[in-house]
Amino acid sequence: MQPMKTWPYPRVVAHRGGGTLAPENTLAGLCVGAAFGHTMAEFDVKLSADDITFLLHDDTLDRTSNGQGAAAQLRYRQIAAFDAGSWLDARFEDEHMPTLAEAAQCCREEGLAANVEIKPCPGRDAQTGRLVAAETARLWAKPMAAGALPPLLSSFSVEALIAAREAAPDVPRGLLVERVPDDWREQTAALGCVSLHASYRHLDEALVARIKEAGLFILAYTVNDLDAAQRLVRWGVDTVCTDRIDLIGPHALD
Ligand code: G3P
Ligand code: MG
């Protein structure tokens, strides 16, 4: 893809859909994020045993559903039957782990841009990168509403990002890291990334300045404190990803 000259995305992204105010990586989460006025959401996407792209953070089902065991061992039809909402609150008992297609449709209806995090199960990095990127390109290729933003792919997995670039070279990519590595210039260049997505805990003003001077954009996660978010933006961070979609509103950092 062509280098991105300006960052089209908003300053605030709702983490896992609705942050901590709704069950993560569900359609209800996306709707709650939008209800708070947010215009972009991040969510995690992996593959079922039958290679369906669907939303889930962990390798296993246990924490965020009434299912058990490794997600990669089950077909999506089985995964879809689990309750992915009651673990947070009984009023979300009808939530399921949606497909990427369902999430894309929900984003379209709610006016949300998407940060699609490729989150491979162990050993499935390349296949997940390839299929999530191809499906993202396909789903967001449908005519978009005026002003709608392109999806942004990201991953901690270098292997997944390489496969994503091969499958969908025109969908922008960000390299996800906890701590910015010494070779961030080489890594992002080799992967054709437009952005670095780093834990805010390991960012400082000088590092942010160096990354910006290199022409990269920066997303900092997961920022749940308004003062910290404002400081990051003063340093030059382009976007913060937050669980506290209530505390850090869509215009809190304008
Ligand atoms: O993209 C930011 C954040 O989602 C990365 O960490 O573990 O919440 O997916 P995690
Ligand atoms: Mg994530």
Image: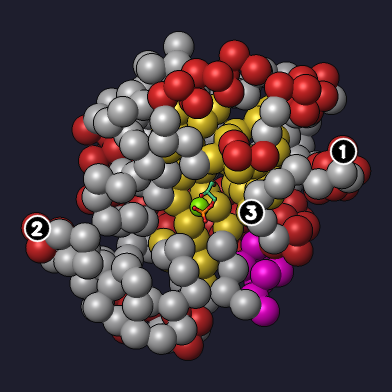
The answer, for residue 10, to whether it is visible in the render is: no
Q: CA distance from mark 1 to mark 3?
A: 16 Å
Q: Amino acid at mark 2?
A: Arg
Region in magenta: 123-130
Mark 2 or 3, nearer chain start: 2
Q: Which residue is mark 2?
A: 91
Q: Which residue is mark 3?
A: 155
Ligand 1 under 8 Å from disc 3 Cβ = no
User: Magenta-highlighted stretch: main secondary structure?
Assistant: helix
Horizontal placement of 45 versus 61: left or right? right
Position above or below: 183 against 162: above
Rendered image coloring scheme: secondary structure
Mark 1 or 2, nearer chain start: 2
Q: CA distance from mark 1 to mark 2?
A: 46 Å
Position above or below: 203 against 243: above
Where is residue 158? Give x, y as percent.
75, 58
For the point 29% across and 38% down, which residue is it? 33
Which quarter shows the N terminus?
A: top right
